[in-house]
Image: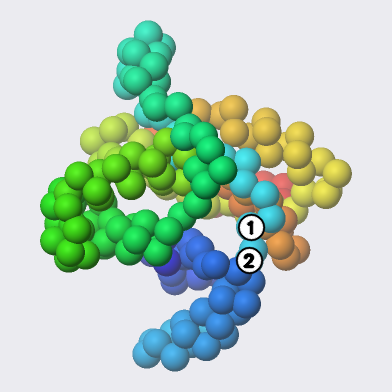
Amino acid sequence: MLTIERTVSGHDIFATVATRDLAAMSRYTLDHLPAIKGVTAVRARIVTHMFIEAGRWRIDALAPGQRARLTAATRSAPTGRDARQVTPADRAVLAHLAQDGRASYQTPATALGTSASTVKRRIDHLTGLGLLGFRCDFARPLGGRPVAATFRARVAPASLPDLGHALIRLPQTRNCAAISGPSNLILQATIGNVPPDIWAEPRGDL
């Protein structure tokens, strides 16, 4: 489970989950989650295409020149036959980072019986490949965007690519993906203060 949110209308809890394959997702959805005390129903939708994910969203606190200076320091991806190989040791490091993404290199190194330099080297390798990324979120009320909303839409399949790419150009869009099910597109947005009656009546299929 990557994220978990408390929501209104339709679902009490909204979670984003990643598994190794569809079989593992089926076990998680059908066996693991329903066995948790208090869970009365589970609905799952599979992401079929990710237009944008929240790690690429920006609050626009930096000027373009400042962003360019930070981007210029990005490492190039490693090359070689085994460059993209993720080892069991890498997975062990990632498991520790999943518990505390701000842990020092020494913390997982001590737990795994290795050195901090080895952990740093593997993290740098995975980051360079784009298989590992870091982001920090912000306090929405303090950042001027206190409202987080999730929309589901029914879109003609042929229009999904064009609509998805149009939505990701909006500054409010954090996540946007094509999904399985009757509502085949999901959009998550962070927006500023809105009039209290703006959500009073659904408009269109959103």
Q: Quadrant of the N terminus?
A: bottom left
The residue most toward the front is 81
Which of the pair 149/181 is nearer the observer?
181
Q: Is residue 146 visible?
A: no
From this view, report whether residue 127 is shown above or below residue 43.
above
Q: Position of residue 83 (x, y in %)?
A: 50, 43
Q: Position of residue 11 (x, y in %)?
A: 50, 70
Q: Determine which of the numbered discs, if any, sits on residue 59 in the image.
A: none
From this view, report whether residue 22 is shown above or below residue 57.
below
Which of the pair 112/40 is nearer the observer?
112
| Residue assigned mark 2 | 45
In the figure, residue 30 lies in which quadrant?
Answer: bottom right
Q: Is 169 left or right of 67, judged from the image as shown? A: right
Q: Residues within 10 Å of mark 2 (few under 14, many from 20)?
A: few
From this view, report whether residue 159 is shown above or below residue 152.
above
The kind of secondary structure element at disc 2 is loop
Name the residue: 77% across, 49% down.
Answer: 155
CB of mark 1 within 8 Å of CB of mark 2?
yes
What residue type is disc 2 on?
Answer: Arg
| Residue assigned mark 1 | 47
Name the residue: 17% across, 64% down.
Answer: 113
Name the residue: 56% across, 82% down.
Answer: 27
Q: Position of residue 162 (x, y in %)?
A: 76, 34
The residue most toward the top is 65
Q: Position of residue 117 (x, y in %)?
A: 20, 44
Q: Is residue 75 visible?
A: yes
